[in-house]
Image (spheres, rainbow, N blue to C red):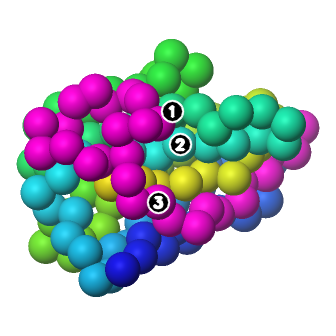
Amino acid sequence: VQLQASGGGLVQAGGSLRLSCAASGLTLQTWTMGWFRQAPGKEREFVAAISRRGGSTSYADSVKGRFTISRDNAKNTGYLQMNSLKPEDTAVYYCARHRYTTGQPMDERASYNYWGQGTQVTVSS
């Protein structure tokens, strides 16, 4: 039972990356899924979340207009498209599956009970 995040890397400021989150041994399609990030010395923080059918999304203010969360339930995979990256976006990015069928609240770390291992995103200035 695991979530596998991938797609991280080193990119220059202004560049783009697309993260993927593939689930094995558990299904994502009936659950809200989210992305969080953790920079060195900081708490893990909410980035974005998407409802189980994709009809509702939520974003942290710091990434609104630059990041887009999506999902493909047929592939049991979620995505985070990150554009106009900034050095302050540098962090380990984690995907997670919500613990409640309501999918609420979307932006609280404690609402998620399955976590991927994280993928490093580094944005150089």
Between 68 and 99, which is closer to the camera in this rendering? 99
User: Answer yes or no: do the residues labelled 3 and 2 have beta carbons within 8 Å?
Assistant: no
Q: Nearer the viewer, mark 3 or mark 2?
A: 3
* Earlier residue among tags 3 and 2: 2
Q: Amino acid at mark 1?
A: Phe
Distance of mark 2 from mark 1, alpha carbons? 4 Å
Q: Quick check: 24 left or right of 91?
A: left
Q: Amino acid at mark 2?
A: Phe
106 left or right, relative to 80 = left
Q: Quadrant of residue 48?
A: top left
Disc 3: which residue: 115
Specify the label residue 46 is tagged with: 1
Above or below: residue 102 compared with residue 97:
above
Image x and y of residue 93, in percent? 61, 52
Report the quarter where the N terminus lies.
Answer: bottom left
Whether residue 11 appears in magenta in the rendering, the answer is: no
Q: Locate residue 88, reporting x and y percent.
A: 77, 31
Q: Position of residue 98 (x, y in %)?
A: 29, 48
